[in-house]
Image (cartoon, grey):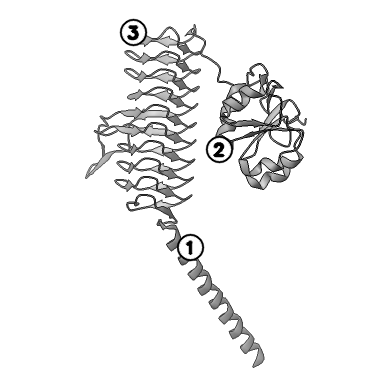
Amino acid sequence: MAWPEIAGDPRFFARSAPQPLRAVAQAACGTLEGADAARLIGGVAPLQLAGPDQLSFLDNRRYAAALEATRAGAVIVHPDMRPRVPEGSAAIVTRDPYAGWARAAALFHPPPPPRPGVHATAMVEDGAEIDPSAEIGPMAVIGAGASIGPGCRIGAAAVIGAGVVLGPDCRIGAQAGVSHALLGARVYVYPGARIGQEGFGFATTEQGFLSVPQLGRVILEDDVEVGANSTIDRGSAHDTVIGAGSRLDNLVQIGHNVRLGRGCVVVAQAGISGSTVLEDQVVVAGQAGLIGHLRIGRRARIGAQAGVMSDVPEGAEWVGSPAGPVREFFRQVALLRRLASRGSASRKDGAAGQEGTG
């Protein structure tokens, strides 16, 4: 069966009432042009699907043709793209259309509020403190001495370990596990993530491996998000710290004693080994790997599948394995291609000479 494409399918996403264009423009932090500010907009959709009562946006110039053909009732655009908005569409002009879209979309599809209370099938151990405004889902487990702050939502079958502290408005997804951790405000741990398990620490002896006790914690500061099925090991003696506002994608591994600064981004399947430090606003792209005990400077960018084996300076862009400065890497690639091309040409010339003497 073919299902029609729908943005914000009402089976999964609650929708607010229609909003006047003035409210939409205000939410997007933009300026409304070419329309009645009282006209109602009922929802959001991509340019190709949007109808006259829906809002859309353009952030990538490659889709300028879709903008010119759209039937959307209103479009969030950069000032440079304002002339390409069709006559039938209102323009909401802002220098950051994607951020405007994020804010406006949240106006129509706000996150569902918690449903206060503890589900009948949840298990709450003695000494746990749960704010009356928090929601504890089916079959969730709240360990002894844990503290669940106001407005928190604990998903089905999630496990909050003994002594864990959740600040206000945290969301813990279904089947996630959090132990040995302190969470700030508005932290979102997606389904299946594992926070606070033992780090990968052992001594090698003549008799075999000897596990080293992992006595640190995990600190997730305000507004951190941890993607589905990601893992963050607790520290061995120091804490593992994820700085405020940082975003971890799905399937990310953070080793013990790692410290991320504020506003870092770590993309899917990347791994950061123990005791490595990322300063503020570092970006680590997908499938990159960082060995332990490194320091990655502020605003550095690590490319996809990079293998980082030494410290990275502030603001640098490194790619490759072993990783190095991006310009140096591509010079090496170009040189190798030239050498390979010359070698191929030499082999062809040699083959042609042999045919001529046959």
Residue 170 numbered tag: none
Q: Report the Cα–Cα distance between label 2 and label 1.
A: 31 Å
- Residue contact between numbered discs 2 and 1, judged by CB atoms under 8 Å: no
Q: Report the Cα–Cα distance between label 3 and label 1.
A: 60 Å
Image coordinates of residue 86 in percent, x first then y, are 75, 38
Residue 55 seen from this side:
yes
Above/below status of 234 relative to 166: below
Q: Residue at x 73, y 25 (%)?
A: 53
Screen quadrant of the N terminus: top right
Of residue 356 and residue 231, the one placed in the foreground of this image is 231
Residue 330 numbered tag: 1
Q: Amino acid at mark 3?
A: Asp
Q: Quadrant of residue 143?
A: top left
Identify the residue position indicated by label 3 in the image.
126
Identify the residue position indicated by label 2 in the image.
96
Of residue 88 and residue 58, the one placed in the foreground of this image is 88
Q: Give whichever of discs 3 and 1 has the lower sequence position.
A: 3
The answer to whether 349 appears left or right of 264 in the picture is right
Screen quadrant of the C terminus: bottom right
Image coordinates of residue 278 in percent, x first then y, are 35, 42
Question: Badge 1: few (under 14), some or many (20 or more) residues near its Cα, within 10 Å?
Answer: some
The answer to whether 34 appears left or right of 111 in the picture is right
Q: Amino acid at mark 1?
A: Phe
Q: Report the Cα–Cα distance between label 3 and label 2.
A: 49 Å
